[in-house]
Amino acid sequence: MKKLTDMPGHLARRFQQTAVAVFAVEMKKTGRDLTPVQYAALVTLFEKPGIDQATLAGLIAYDRTTIGGVVDRLVRKGLVRREVGIDRRARILHLTEEGNGALNAVSTAVETAQSVMLEGLKPDERDELMHLLGKAIASLNDYSRAKPFVP
């Protein structure tokens, strides 16, 4: 039987746990209460204003049934505005002015978190890891509920 430390799934889970912890530490320094998923939602809404919740879920690789809770929390924080779409079933999303400000306020902390996550690697190893992760994820698109990942 393989050791856990030789299993990519186990290592990916451990890295993800650590990445969330690092993100939380850096976010706390900003005084903002944002999770990695909430940050991903804000960035995506900045890049694609006016998308619906289902599209947002696909773009950030999040479960469609639980994206509503993420959006609810962002609305309560005043960072996102939700509108009823033309077909009345879709919820159209926009960043608020405060949401744009929050993205600007945390950008340095997020960049720092990304660097901390890879600090044990040399620059060329960081590039290689990012390349290989993208390649591995893209090769598993058929298993994902998210839109296809293209590195």
Image (tube, helix red, strand yellow):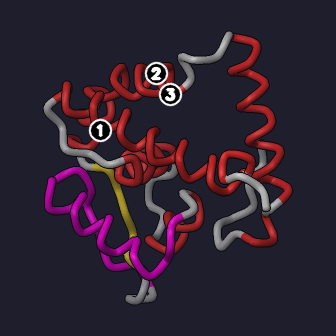
State whether residue 107 is above or below residue 79: above
State whether residue 53 is above or below residue 131: below
State whether residue 19 is above or below residue 140: above
Q: Is there a contact, CB below 8 Å, between mark 1 and mark 3? A: no
- The image shows residue 105 at horizontal and vertical percentages of 25, 26
Is 87 displayed left or right of 15 in the figure?
A: left
The stretch in magenta equals 62-86
Residue highlighted by disc 2: 116
Q: Residue at x 35, y 52 (%)?
A: 38
First in sequence: mark 1 vs mark 3: 1
Q: Considering the numbered disc 1 on the image, is that residue within a helix, a strand or a loop?
A: helix
Mark 2: amino acid: Val
- The image shows residue 56 at horizontal and vertical percentages of 50, 63
Residue highlighted by disc 1: 24
Q: Is residue 71 magenta?
A: yes
Q: Is there a contact, CB below 8 Å, between mark 3 and mark 2? A: yes
